[in-house]
Each structure stands twice: as C-alpha cells, then as structure tokens.
Amino acid sequence: MKIRSEIVGQKKSLQFLRRLGKYGQQAIVRATNRTGSTAKKLSDQEIREQVSLNQKQVLSRLYFRQATKNRVEYVIWAEKRGRLLSRYSHRVLKKGVKVKVKKGGPQKLIPGAFKTRVKAGGRWVEVIAGPGERNVAGRRKRYRTGSSKIDVFYGPSVSQVFNQTRDRITNRVNRRFEEQIDKELANALKRLKRS
C-alpha cells in the first residue's frame, strides 16, 4: 500500500506561490519534500512502536520518492513481503523457538520449530523453520525455500504494519505541511526581493 500526498492545504498560499514563478514552484517542491521526509520518519517510529524490529530493518523496507517540479507529490510505500521470524527477537529452546513480534507483547512459543540456515538468492540466510506438513495425498508440500521437508515461518511485513499506522500520522503530517508552506513562502518572498 502506498501513501500519495499531493499538495493540498492553504489554497491562498499555494496560489500566491504559483504566481511567484520559479521561486514559488521551488518553494512548493521543497515544502512537499520536507513534509514527505517527516512522514517517513513518523511512519518509521510508529512501525517500531508496533513490532520489535530495529530501525535499520524497518527503513530497509520503507521507501520514499520525492516530489519534482513536474510531479508535485511525494510517495511513501513499504515492501509487502513478510519478514522472516528470525529478524524478530527470538530464543531457541529444546522444545521449540520463542519469538517476540509485538513490541510490548510476550514471547510466544512455536513448538517443534528450530533455527537453521537456507540458501536464498545466492547467500545463506538464518531462518526459523518447522517440519513440513503433509497434504492429503501423503506428499510433503513444497515451499519457497525449495525444500519440501521444512516450513519457513514469516512474521508481519512492514507494509502490513505501515497500513495500520498511516491514519495515526496524517494529522501531524498535515500540520507539518502547513508550517513548511509558511516558511517557504517567506523564503520565496526574500529571494524575489533580492533579484
């Protein structure tokens, strides 16, 4: 899921900035991009409050495309693929693996699970897996790992958590945009007076 934010806000300020020509257009793009980077930062913080991933793991899956003079909107989106459970806080026990997905929640035991390494994309990756289940015909199911003997476990993707947090940051982002438009309006007027 993507967030697309076109510039909507103080119409009088935006119309005035457009009349300023080159300086006004630059001001609109700058205000939009600064608001977009703030929105990405707030999204990152909200996601990390929900799940026990670190900042590097969240930002590697959260993307931001800046506004340009031809396309005055920023876009924030997250990768939809689920995160491996081995990326979350976990402990290996004799009877299985305990994993903590929610930030303030307890660790949950996955009975019979174990930690192993599989080759994915030409490199070895640590995963939490369990024995593969058999289907009706008695054959084992084939999973993404290419092995029919294990079942690799995934947690929620950054995109799933991002979709839940979008509504919480909208008001803060809109306020930030209004503040940025006011600052850029003042800066555009100063530049216009100098030239």
Image (cartoon, helix red, strand yellow):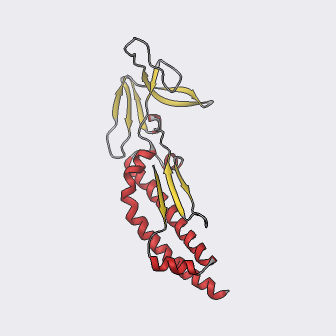
Q: Is residue 118 left or right of residue 168?
A: right
Relative to 174, say whether 57 is above or below.
above
Across and down, in percent, residue 32 comes to 52, 67
Camera-nearest residue between 195 and 42 = 195
| Residue extending farthest bottom | 193
Q: Is residue 158 left or right of residue 194?
A: left
Across and down, in percent, residue 89 comes to 42, 39
Q: Residue at x 48, y 79 (%)?
A: 13
Q: Residue at x 48, y 18 (%)?
A: 148
Q: Residue at x 60, y 85 (%)?
A: 190
Relative to 64, say whether 118 is above or below.
above
Across and down, in percent, residue 110 comes to 36, 28
Camera-nearest residue between 5 and 188 = 5
Q: Residue at x 46, y 21 (%)?
A: 150
Q: How many marks?
A: 0
Q: Is residue 122 left or right of residue 164?
A: right
Across and down, in percent, residue 88 comes to 44, 39
| Residue extending farthest right | 195
Camera-nearest residue between 106 and 122 = 122
| Residue extending farthest top | 138
Occupied quadrant, residue 17: bottom right
Relative to 54, say whether 31 is above or below.
below
Camera-nearest residue between 51 and 121 = 121
Occupied quadrant, residue 123: top right
* The C terminus - image quarter: bottom right
